Image (cartoon, rainbow, N blue to C red):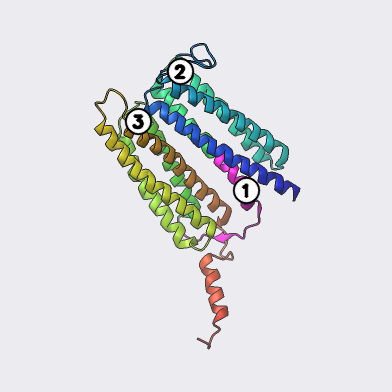
């Protein structure tokens, strides 16, 4: 019981670190959307100072660095806490992995400032940010009380399995985020990102339909599908609006406020979409096994209950 209480505290703290990482992603997107990436020429100091003059684009870059430092400290605390209270070796390793990722992210950010090459270093910086975020999401799930409790396995006799579809959907969304980051940082045009949106649409719809058809009465899977579809629908609308703002303000001397708001929201919801798909994948791994035919499916359970309630000859 004591260990469960300690892990519950770790779980709540992990959620707080995830939330702070969303704020960090927003701060990073604000730097890019406001063309402020080159506002500070040195690193880790800013114009040789701990606190530089907070004018122009320096404000966005400096706030981004401050939030990044806070997230790094929170991640350090999380990793140490997990190492002290969690007996699962793989969970402790995951905590240290998150810490290594946040430090690698800081080094990539410094490389972007000192060496330039935005199309490569900035894109890599954005990609690693997503990997760090979903690592924290995984930690939050693995330390939850739901993950610690026993769950009866459910047979997934269909093909492809829900777990397989969800994993592929997560991979496709991740590739789509790479394409979006590469477009934002000037590696190539928007066409690959638009094509990727079509592929993501097919995978999200397919995965959601299969999951709801086979496991509609399993609350954890049903909630995960709702989150996936909600973030996906929001992301599609934001993508269309952000592209409209690009076309509308293409000739503006400075990024317009509608473009900044829409593009930053598009980046943030993209990260939440990836997290939603990952959660569906992990929940499916936990519950929906490609187990022998002896394992009951939700439909079999309902049929058995119906037969018991209406014995032969009484209907």
Q: Which mark is residue 113?
A: 2
Q: Which badge, 2 or 1, is on the more N-terminal residue?
A: 2
Quadrant of res 85: top right
Residue at the extreme top: 48
Determine crowd level at label 3: few under 14, some 14-19, many 20+ residues with C-alpha closer than 10 A: some
* Nearer to us in this view, 127 or 285: 127
Residue beneath the point at 25% across and 33% down: 247
| Element type where label 2 sits in the image | helix
Q: Position of residue 134 (x, y in %)?
A: 52, 39
* Nearer to us in this view, 115 or 56: 56
Q: Is 223 on the left-hand or right-hand side of 99?
A: left
Q: Is 65 on the left-hand or right-hand side of 73?
A: left
Residue beneath the point at 37% across and 28% down: 33
Q: Which badge, 3 or 2, is on the more N-terminal residue?
A: 2
Q: Position of residue 168 (x, y in %)?
A: 45, 46
| Element type where label 1 sits in the image | loop
Q: Position of residue 68 (x, y in %)?
A: 53, 27
Q: Say if the magenta span includes residue 144.
A: yes
State how far apart marks 1 and 3 are (Cα): 36 Å
The stretch in magenta equals 135-159
Q: Nearer the viewer, mark 1 or mark 3?
A: 1
| Element type where label 3 sits in the image | helix
Residue identified by numbered label 3? 183
State how far apart marks 2 and 1 are (Cα): 38 Å
Residue identified by numbered label 1? 144
């Amino acid at each position: 019981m004591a260990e469960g209480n300690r892990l519950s505290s770790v779980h709540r703290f992990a959620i707080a670190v995830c939330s702070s990482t969303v704020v960090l992603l927003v701060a990073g997107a604000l730097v890019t959307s406001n063309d402020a990436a080159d506002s500070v020429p040195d690193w880790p100091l800013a114009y040789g100072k701990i606190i530089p003059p907070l004018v122009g684009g320096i404000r966005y870059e400096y706030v981004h660095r401050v939030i990044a430092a806070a997230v790094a400290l929170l991640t350090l605390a999380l990793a140490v806490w997990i190492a002290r209270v969690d007996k699962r070796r793989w969970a402790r390793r995951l905590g240290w992995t998150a810490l290594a990722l946040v430090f690698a992210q800081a080094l990539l950010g410094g490389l972007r400032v000192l060496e330039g090459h935005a199309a490569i270093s900035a894109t890599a910086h954005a990609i690693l940010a997503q990997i760090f975020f979903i690592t924290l999401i995984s930690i939050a799930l693995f330390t939850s009380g739901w993950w610690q409790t026993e769950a009866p396995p459910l047979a997934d006799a269909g093909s492809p399995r829900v777990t397989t579809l969800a994993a592929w959907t997560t991979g496709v969304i991740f590739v789509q985020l790479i394409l979006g980051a590469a477009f934002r940082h000037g590696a190539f045009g928007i066409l690959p990102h638009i094509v990727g949106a079509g592929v993501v649409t097919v995978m999200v719809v397919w995965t959601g339909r299969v999951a709801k058809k086979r496991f509609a009465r399993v609350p954890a899977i049903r909630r995960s599908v709702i989150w996936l579809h909600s973030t996906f629908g929001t992301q599609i609308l934001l993508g269309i609006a952000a592209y409209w703002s690009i076309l509308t303000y293409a000739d503006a001397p400075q990024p317009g406020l509608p473009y900044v708001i829409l593009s930053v929201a598009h980046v943030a919801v993209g990260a939440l979409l990836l997290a939603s798909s990952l959660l569906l994948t992990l929940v499916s791994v936990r519950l929906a096994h490609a187990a022998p035919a002896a394992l009951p499916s939700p439909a079999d359970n309902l049929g058995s209950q119906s037969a018991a309630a209406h014995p032969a000859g009484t209907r």
